[in-house]
Image (cartoon, rainbow, N blue to C red):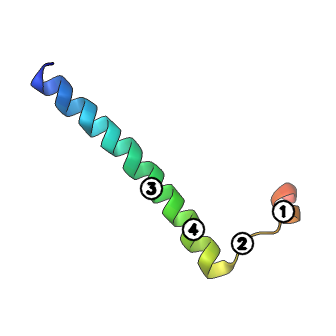
Amino acid sequence: MDEDLRRRLIYGLLNLLLGLAAAWLATYLTNKILGAMDSQKKLEA
């Protein structure tokens, strides 16, 4: 496997994983600070 291809593949995978982790963490912290939304409020929004 070419060195440049391997570098881009690892970069893309890390970018995906860190993006997912950041989104999860933002949701988790928001729910901890403000409290989880009711299921009824989720349906209305």
Q: Residue at x 87, y 58 (%)?
A: 44
Q: Which residue is mark 1?
A: 39
Q: Residues within 10 Å of mark 1 (few under 14, many from 20)?
A: few
Farthest residue in the top direction? 1
On screen, residue 12 versus residue 2, left or right, reads right
| Percent x, y of residue 1 | 15, 18
Q: Which residue is mark 2?
A: 36
Farthest residue in the left direction? 3
Q: Which kind of residue does numbered mark 4 sit on?
A: Tyr
**Earlier sequence position, callout 4 versus callout 1:** 4
Q: Compared to 35, does 10 lie above or below?
A: above
Residue 37 lies in quadrant: bottom right
| Percent x, y of residue 31 | 64, 72
Residue 41 lies in quadrant: bottom right
Q: CA distance from mark 2 to mark 3?
A: 19 Å
Q: Secondary structure at mark 4?
A: helix
**Which dot marks residue 28?**
4
| Percent x, y of residue 21 | 45, 55
Q: Compared to 13, does 18 lie above or below?
A: below
**Earlier sequence position, callout 3 versus callout 4:** 3
Farthest residue in the front direction? 1
Q: Which kind of residue does numbered mark 3 sit on?
A: Ala
**Which dot marks residue 21?**
3
On screen, residue 30 versus residue 19, left or right, reads right
